[in-house]
């Protein structure tokens, strides 16, 4: 009886909210159109022109782009009556790029609904995952906004929700299922994603502490070419995608620890370890805000297997600090300084007989790569996480031989595979304002060390490629138009020597 009453209540809420929404779905919607052009001295756009743009800016240059968007956010959430209503919103953003590889696509196309603290959405939506400065960062490690958003269904808490009545401890979380589509090695595979973050400190306090974790998994699908799995000698024609597989994916339970492989015809995971390609970060942050300034310090620690648990990869991660000058209307308004290190990866010893009984020695984590999902942590040819770990096709200044020397891999290397994932990078970002003109300046320097291994247990010859990338962005309004211009530079290193930029004109209605 209770179950029936609950179902009727949910249906009634949905119908009421939908009826109100359907009466005038365009009321309160915002429209915008954009036209942009990209040019450079090389055949590719500079690093800071194309990075962290949600896949909208093409790699090739020159190019021309037309964009249009329609968005409707939730109605006012400031009063108690609105918070008790079922609210709806949506967004769509279409992009047409004309150039060497012309394409038309939607970088956003979603519908969303909110009731109280909970939100559900389905479709493509721009997001950044992790504790990080959202405006000037070099990019959150796991989910930076570098790649095109993939289609997902997600339920979560709209914002931090108090766990205690006095608001001292608050909580924010999400749970999502997404679709990667098909790649060179794997067809029709999925995304599992969840996160949980806590905030210690009342909303009115000047100082607050944050801590949390995010977890992403590539899983399911089938190999484009069936293969024989070592250990079971089974012909693998598909990867586990049933409820049992999902439980192993969501919990991250090691199949080796359970003492079995999956059934014949189903792969057990990389080396019989975990089902799917798992990765994420454990984050901490400290915020201090007064009348004049807002400070934010954050650290993202990387995990892909057990190396972080035994602290052997603790040196790797993203470290950042930002200061916002709240009362300043002219001059420097915000400064962000960040350091990214992915070079350690738990050391150069691979998992195997030599490290089986000494977990602290397990290393060579090979960030963003996976033996089963050979595309790695890439969607539509762009890295989902930090743009400093990029596919070979985006490393425009080098060839495969530059990265691996005379080593001959036993299998073909896909052009979108990540070959350089051992990186140290520093970035300074500054937001300033002169008169009515907003300025955004970025300067980054990275040391690129390639990777430890490629399809073997033969340690690759160490390399070091230094890369400097600079961006100066200028934006201002002229009547109803917003002009956004970028000039950028890459030195010859991991990327080709390049000077270029973009000019985008936006009109809102």
Image (cartoon, helix red, strand yellow):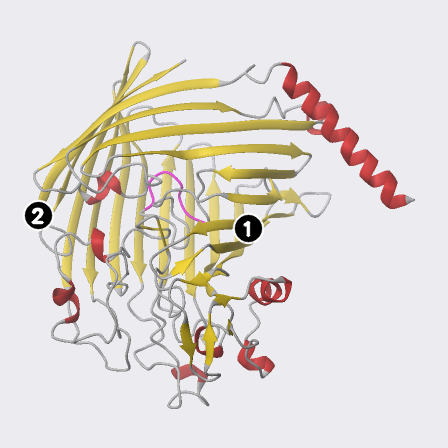
Find residue 110 and report its horizontal and vertical position in percent.
51, 33
Q: Report the span colored magenta.
A: 131-137
Q: Nearer the viewer, residue 168 or 250?
A: 250
Q: Is residue 281 left or right of residue 405?
A: right
Secondary structure under tag 1 reads strand
User: Residue 69 occupies which quadrant of the picture?
Assistant: top left
Mark 1 vs mark 2, CA separation in Å: 40 Å
Q: Residue at x 62, y 64 (%)?
A: 247
Circle 1 residues within 10 Å: few <14, some 14–19, many ≥20: some
Give the numbered dot on residue 497: 2
On the question of residue 13 being in view, the answer is yes
Secondary structure under tag 2 reads loop
Q: Residue at x 81, y 39 (%)?
A: 7
Report the mark closest to the observer, 1 or 2. Answer: 1
Q: Check the image and report above or below for 428 versus 446.
A: above
Circle 2 residues within 10 Å: few <14, some 14–19, many ≥20: some
Q: Is residue 422 left or right of residue 298?
A: left
């Amino acid at each position: 009886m209770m179950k029936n009453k609950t179902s009727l209540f949910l249906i009634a809420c949905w119908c009421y909210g939908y009826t109100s929404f359907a009466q005038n779905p365009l009321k309160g919607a915002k429209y915008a159109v954009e036209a942009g052009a990209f040019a450079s001295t090389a055949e590719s756009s500079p690093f800071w022109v194309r990075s962290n743009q949600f896949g909208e800016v093409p790699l090739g240059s020159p190019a021309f782009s037309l964009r249009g968007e329609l968005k409707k956010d939730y109605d006012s959430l400031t009063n108690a009556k609105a918070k008790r209503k079922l609210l709806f919103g949506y967004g769509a953003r279409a992009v047409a790029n004309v150039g060497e590889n012309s394409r038309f696509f939607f970088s956003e196309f979603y519908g969303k609904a909110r009731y109280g603290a909970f939100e559900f959405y389905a479709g493509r939506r721009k997001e950044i995952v992790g504790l990080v400065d959202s405006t000037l960062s070099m990019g959150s490690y796991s989910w930076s906004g570098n790649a095109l958003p993939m289609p997902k269904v997600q339920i979560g808490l709209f914002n931090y929700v108090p766990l205690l009545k006095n608001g001292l401890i608050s909580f924010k979380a999400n749970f999502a299922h997404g679709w990667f589509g098909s790649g060179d090695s794997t067809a029709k595979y999925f995304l599992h994603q969840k996160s949980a973050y806590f905030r210690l400190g009342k909303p009115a306090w000047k100082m607050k502490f944050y801590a949390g974790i995010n977890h992403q998994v590539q899983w399911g699908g089938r190999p484009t070419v069936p293969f024989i799995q070592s250990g079971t000698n089974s012909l693998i024609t598909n990867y586990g995608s049933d409820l049992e597989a999902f439980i192993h994916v969501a919990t991250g339970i090691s199949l080796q620890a359970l003492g079995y492989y999956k059934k014949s015809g189903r792969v057990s995971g990389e080396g019989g370890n975990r089902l799917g390609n798992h990765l994420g970060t454990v984050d901490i942050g400290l915020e201090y805000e007064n009348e004049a300034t807002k400070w934010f310090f954050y650290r993202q620690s990387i995990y892909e297997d057990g190396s972080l648990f035994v602290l052997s990869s603790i040196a790797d991660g993203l470290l950042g600090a930002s200061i916002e000058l709240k009362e300043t209307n002219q001059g420097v308004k915000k400064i962000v300084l960040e350091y990214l290190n992915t070079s350690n990866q738990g050391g150069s010893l691979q998992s195997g007989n030599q490290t089986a009984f000494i977990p602290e020695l397990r290393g060579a984590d090979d960030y963003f790569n996976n033996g089963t999902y050979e595309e790695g942590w890439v969607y539509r040819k762009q890295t989902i996480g930090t743009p400093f770990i990029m596919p070979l096709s985006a490393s425009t200044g080098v060839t495969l031989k530059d990265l691996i020397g005379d080593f001959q891999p036993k299998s073909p290397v896909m052009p979108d595979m990540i070959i350089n994932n051992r990186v140290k990078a520093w970035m300074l970002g500054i937001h300033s304002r002169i008169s009515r003109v907003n300025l955004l300046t970025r300067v980054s320097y990275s040391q690129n060390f390639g990777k430890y291994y490629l399809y073997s247990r033969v340690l690759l010859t160490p390399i070091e490629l230094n890369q400097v990338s600079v961006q100066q962005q200028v934006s201002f309004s002229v009547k109803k138009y917003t002009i956004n211009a970028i000039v950028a530079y890459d030195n010859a290193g991991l990327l080709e020597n390049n000077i270029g930029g973009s000019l985008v004109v936006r009109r809102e209605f």
